[in-house]
Image (cartoon, rainbow, N blue to C red):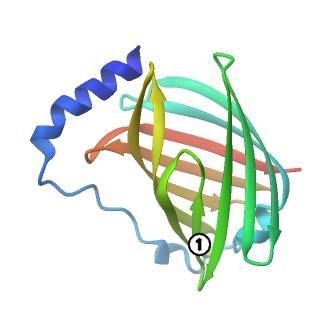
């Protein structure tokens, strides 16, 4: 219910933000010298556990979730098979199909991703953007994700993604990944 009101308010506010550009994002180049260096193919290989929250614009936790990821690569093609369990008992599956493009760049596709996700890695960081089809109360909304991942150790990565629609920030997803 809270999400429906939030998305309705965003729709109403859209007329006031048309013509305004989205928030500027930090540059991936800021992390080029950071260690440990993130090798996406190495980190997302094998089984990982993730723990996360979705917070609304005020910072209140709307949902908690866990994810088990089974990841594998064949050459430049990767599969991230994610099984989500949400705090309200709902389950979700997302299978990312990643492609290494070279020079730290990657693309990705999943059934609920509109078009293609594009990302880039430098130093300990990975940044990618994509549009996700998000079901809410029987309707589907297309929302944009500005997604940042930071390798902390060889086993732990932190992830913070900002979700927006029509340039208006809806909330954030925060995750901690742990390699088994």
x, y percent for residue 63: 56, 24
Against 130, residue 4 (above or below) is above
x, y percent for residue 72: 82, 62
x, y percent for residue 78: 74, 65
Q: In which quarter of the image is residue 76?
A: bottom right
Q: Quadrant of residue 123?
A: bottom right
For residue 150, side relative to residue 114 (left or right): right
- Residue that appears at 51% across and 61% down: 117
**Nearer to me, 21 or 37:** 21
- Residue that appears at 89% across and 50% down: 180
Against 79, residue 90 (above or below) is above
Instruction: Label 1: state its secondary structure.
Output: strand
For residue 56, side relative to residue 50 (left or right): left
**Nearer to me, 70 or 176:** 70
**Nearer to me, 38 or 167:** 167
- Residue that appears at 66% across and 30% down: 65
Quadrant showing the N terminus: top left
Q: Quadrant of residue 49?
A: top right
- Considering every residue shown, the one lying at the far bottom of the view is 103
x, y percent for residue 150: 62, 60
- Residue that appears at 48% across and 78% down: 29
For residue 58, side relative to residue 84 (left or right): left
Crowdedness of circle 1 by 10 Å Cα count: few (<14), some, many (20+)?
Answer: many
Task: Tell me how many marks there are.
Answer: 1
Mark 1 sits on what residue?
A: 106
């Amino acid at each position: 219910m809270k999400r429906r009101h939030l998305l309705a308010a965003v729709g109403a506010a859209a007329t006031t933000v048309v013509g305004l550009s989205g928030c500027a994002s930090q540059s991936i180049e800021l992390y080029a010298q950071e260690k440990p260096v993130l090798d996406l193919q190495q980190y997302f290989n094998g089984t990982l556990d993730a723990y996360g929250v979705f917070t609304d614009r005020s910072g209140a936790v709307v949902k908690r979730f866990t994810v088990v990821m089974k990841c594998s690569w064949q050459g430049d093609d990767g599969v991230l098979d994610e099984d989500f369990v949400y705090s309200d008992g709902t389950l979700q599956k997302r299978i990312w199909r990643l492609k290494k493009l070279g020079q730290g760049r990657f693309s990705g596709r999943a059934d609920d991703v509109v078009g293609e996700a594009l990302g880039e890695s430098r130093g300990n960081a990975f940044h990618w953007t994509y549009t996700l089809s998000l079901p809410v109360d029987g309707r589907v909304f297309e929302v944009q994700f500005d997604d940042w991942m930071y390798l902390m150790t060889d086993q732990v990565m932190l992830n913070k993604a900002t979700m927006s629609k029509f340039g208006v920030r809806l909330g954030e997803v925060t995750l901690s990944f742990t390699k088994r």
